């Protein structure tokens, strides 16, 4: 394997929107992957009012999100859901049931 530069080694791992949405759907089951994908796209529009503005990097037409930022969103959204009385287990059940009815 070739050597990586120090800039490459220190750069955070980033996921494009579709992969980030899949990760969030698995780790924060309050939305499915399609819903998370829409949330991620809308969250990055400056004209939209959002509770939590995610940091991202745009390269060409692609939005990239770091794992650190995805973990922050997961924590924020899961805490918000728990304040409304949902446990992780109940959220996973609701998502699974929603997928079954499609």
Image (tube, rainbow, N blue to C red):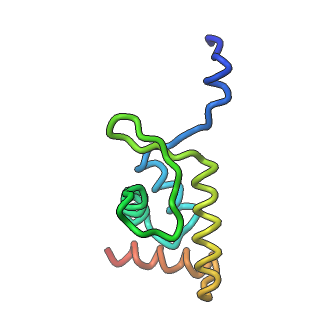
Q: Nearer the viewer, residue 69 or 15?
A: 69
Percent of width and height locating residue 23 = 53, 54
- Outermost residue on the front side: it is 47
Percent of width and height locating residue 100 = 39, 75
Q: How many marks?
A: 0
**Picture quadrant where residue 28 is located:** bottom right
Percent of width and height locating residue 70 = 57, 54
- Outermost residue on the top side: it is 2
Q: Residue at x 58, y 62 (%)?
A: 73
Q: Residue at x 68, y 20 (%)?
A: 6
Q: Nearer the viewer, residue 77 or 22?
A: 77
Question: Position of 18 compared to 83: left or right?
Answer: left
Question: Position of 10 compared to 48: left or right?
Answer: right
Q: Is residue 15 above or below residue 92?
A: above
Q: Residue at x 47, y 55 (%)?
A: 22
Q: Residue at x 51, y 71 (%)?
A: 51
Q: Quadrant of the N terminus?
A: top right
Q: Quadrant of the C terminus?
A: bottom left
Q: Is residue 46 above or below residue 93?
A: above
Percent of width and height locating residue 86 = 60, 84
Q: Is residue 29 above or below residue 17?
A: below
**Picture quadrant where residue 46 is located:** bottom left
């Amino acid at each position: 394997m070739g050597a990586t530069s120090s800039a490459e080694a220190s750069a955070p791992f980033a996921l494009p929107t579709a992969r980030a949405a899949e990760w969030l759907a698995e780790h924060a089951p309050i939305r499915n992957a399609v819903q998370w994908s829409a949330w991620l796209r809308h969250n990055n529009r400056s004209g939209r009012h959002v509770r939590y503005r995610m940091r991202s990097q745009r390269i060409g037409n692609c939005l990239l999100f770091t794992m650190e930022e995805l973990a922050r969103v997961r924590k924020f959204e899961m805490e918000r859901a728990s304040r409304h009385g949902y446990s992780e287990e109940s959220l996973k059940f609701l998502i699974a049931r929603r997928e079954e009815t499609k």
